[in-house]
Image: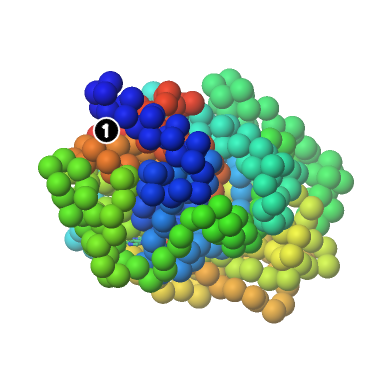
Amino acid sequence: MNTDETRKKKLIRVLSVLIRGHSFLMQHALIIGGGVIGAACAHYLLKSDWRVTIIDRDEFGRGCSHANCGFVCPSHVLPLAMPGAIGQTVRALFRPNSPFSIKPRLEPALWSWLVHFARQCNQADMLEAGRAIQALLNSSRLLYDELFETEKLDAEWETRGLLFVFLTPEGLDHYRHTDELLRQHFGLNATHYDSRQLTDLEPALKPGLAGGFHYQSDAHLRPDKLMTSWRKLLADRGAEVHEHCDFHGFLRHGNQAAAAQTSAGDKTADTFIIATGAWTPRLNIDLGCKIPIQPGKGYSLTMPRPAQCPKIPLIFEEHRVAVTPMQSGYRLGSIMEFAGYDMSLNPRRLDLLRTGASHYLHEPTCQPIIEEWCGLRPMTYDSKPIIGRSPALENVYLAAGHNMLGLSMATATGKLIAETVNHETPHIALEPYSPSRF
Ligand SMILES: Cc1cc2nc3c(=O)[nH]c(=O)nc-3n(C[C@H](O)[C@H](O)[C@H](O)COP(=O)(O)OP(=O)(O)OC[C@H]3O[C@@H](n4cnc5c(N)ncnc54)[C@H](O)[C@@H]3O)c2cc1C
């Protein structure tokens, strides 16, 4: 963008601030996708005086952002691709009842994704991805604190940390290496608990477990409540939400998008934000770049709180089950299934959550089950999200591919998008997340 154009945009912003309420003077952003990423982009754009419309082909907040585990977790800096991950993946594929699976199929995009993933499984790429992930996680965590301090959002926000629990001494010993790596390279200091201390800290756990690591920086919330109350806040600030509005592509004018073509007609705006999560690769041609996102299906079970409900959110690494004690409920979640866009609920996978948790908790489940759910995580092979301008269209920006951490990275992503479209210096260097890196 040349200096004249930047000046023009700045002048328009100044005028729109001066004449608040005169929406014809405000710049208009159309956000495609009403998940947590779209909501966060809307929030920070509204804060910088944009007019905002969100469209979703389904209902706002009903995609992957609906019933995930609700962790906002700066402890999760490590990408999936790391040394040793290929062996672990192959072994998991041949293990019955593994929480990780790939539905075998001849899909070039999946095989290309897997090959690139394998190439990333080395120390240097792991650390590089980890640093990029950490920048977003740390910024987001602070922004969530600010968000809950300054806004009336009812999302059951709690800051009790996250406790990694190990059943066996082998599991615990294996994790010690990860803990050391997190300490050395990322400055993450967990508190270690032995078997006895663990049950003192969290009496909902069974006695005789090997030990655990507590990351006190982490927090959690109830994702569906966040989405409901965020939507209300955005609407109160003037955002429009159009549901059941399917985006198909752009009407172009040179290297600009003039309008979004949708099932509800063409929608014009000054700027377009693509926040379509796992479905983003379907827009490859329009965006002028490859979007190597594979849908990674995960499951959750939501119940009332059991009588012996944990106080602290838990992760059982050896069984890959996460436990979220919410103020108004209780959730088990996890599983990673690469099965394309199939949204069917596999009862065997849901059982893995129940049986996995039963090794660790006095009361692993509670009746009645309120919701059995699956969601598609937008998985990139380098575990980094895709944030930045589309190479093909100057007024189209991407905010997608947040893998297993979309909730944890949402606020920083929203802020980055607002900074970028406003031509401000981004608070985090954007290069690692560039849409052109693939
Ligand atoms: C079991 C499970 C547990 C998880 N736990 C956590 C956790 O504890 N912490 C964490 O940080 N992350 C967690 N995640 C990951 C997190 O849920 C995702 O990273 C995040 O929800 C992605 O947000 P999103 O807004 O990109 O996608 P979504 O929430 O899926 O939103 C994308 C939206 O785009 C819409 N859309 C798609 N295509 C179109 C189109 N063509 N036109 C219009 N609209 C369209 C969809 O309908 C959808 O509403 C978990 C995921 C799962 C499955």
Q: Can the viewer see residue 17?
A: yes
In the image, is residue 378 above or below residue 241? above
Q: Which residue is mark 1?
A: 437
Q: Residue at x 49, y 37 (%)?
A: 17
In the rendered view, would you say 304 is above or below 153? below
Q: Nearer the viewer, residue 396 or 156?
A: 396
Secondary structure of the residue carrying numbered label 1: helix
* Image quadrant in which you'd find residue 147: top right
Tell me which residue sits at (68%, 27%) in the image.
189
Residue 271 location, x and y as percent?
A: 32, 45
Residue shown at 58% from the left, 32% from the top? 138
Amino acid beneath label 1: Arg
The quadrant holding residue 343 is bottom left
Q: How many marks?
A: 1
Residue drawn at 28 percent across, 21 percent down: 3
Rendered image quadrant of residue 354: bottom right
Answer yes or no: disc 1 within 8 Å of ligand 1.
Answer: no
The residue closer to the viewer here, 324 or 253, is: 253
Within-10-Å neighbours for mark 1: few <14, some 14–19, many 20+: few
Q: Is residue 296 left or right of residue 285?
A: right
Q: Position of residue 83 (x, y in %)?
A: 41, 33
| In the image: residue 255, left or right of residue 349 | left
> Which one is in front, 205 or 2?
2
Image quadrant holding the N terminus, namely top left
Q: Which residue, as the protein is rendered here, is positioned at the far left? A: 254
Q: Quadrant of the C terminus?
A: top left
Near-viewer residue (253 or 7): 7
- Image location of residue 59, percent across then percent down: 45, 68
Regarding ligand 1, which quadrant of the image does it lie in? Answer: bottom left
Residue 12 is left or right of residue 62, and the answer is left
Residue 180 shows up from this direction: no
Q: Position of residue 22 (x, y in %)?
A: 46, 48
